[in-house]
Image (cartoon, rainbow, N blue to C red):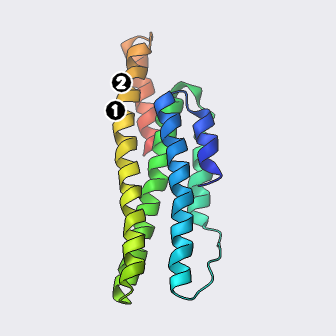
Amino acid sequence: MTKALPKMAKAASSEQLRQAFEEHLDQTKGHVERFQQVFEMLGEKASGKKCMGMEGLAKEGAEIMDEDDVMDAALISAAQRVEHYEIAAYGTVCAYADLLDESEQASLLRETLGEEKETDQKLTELSKEINLEAEEGSEEDSSERKHRGKRKLGRAA
C-alpha cells in the first residue's frame, strides 16, 4: 500500500479524496512500524512477504485508474476492497494474538484494525459526496447516466 497510495492520490481529482489517500499513507507507515514492534515484542524478525491477494487488488485498482469518466468512484471502490482485505487480515491476527495470550500485541493490532475500519468508513462517506457531485456535474441525458451507472456498478461488483 505504501507504493499504491501515492499513485491513487495523484490520480484522484477530488481534493478531499487526494487528502484522504495521503493521510492513509502516513497511517499505513505507522501500521508497518506497529507491526514491526509486535514482532520485536515476540522476539521475532519482521520480514515482508509478497501477498498475492493484495497484489491482485493493486493490479485491479491500476486498471480502473485508466477510466477517466468515473475515476474517483473507481479509486474509492479499489481502496475499499483493499481496506476490507486488510480488515480481514488484522482481524485474524488479533484473534491469533488473543489465542496465544499476547495481550500487548493484540492491543497494538486492534489499534491498527480500528484505523482500517475508520478509513473504510471515511471512504464510504467520501463516496456519497463525490458520486453526488459527479452526477450533478454531468450534462449527459438521464438514459446515458443510467447506463454509465450500471457500468460503474458492474465494475464495483
Q: Residue at x 43, y 14 (%)?
A: 137
Q: Badge 1, how many Cα within 10 Å: few under 14, some, many 20+?
A: few
Q: Residue at x 58, y 38 (%)?
A: 9
Whether residue 74 can be seen here: no
Q: Residue at x 46, y 52 (%)?
A: 81
Q: Position of residue 129 (x, y in %)?
A: 36, 28
Q: Amino acid at mark 2?
A: Leu
Whether residue 105 can be seen here: yes
Q: Position of residue 107 (x, y in %)?
A: 37, 74
Mark 1: secondary structure: helix
- For mark 2, what is the residue? 132
Alpha carbons under labels 2 and 1: distance apart: 6 Å
47 vs 67: above or below? below
Q: Position of residue 110 (x, y in %)?
A: 37, 69
- For mark 1, what is the residue? 128
Tell which of 57 and 87 is nearer to you.
Answer: 87
33 vs 45: above or below? above
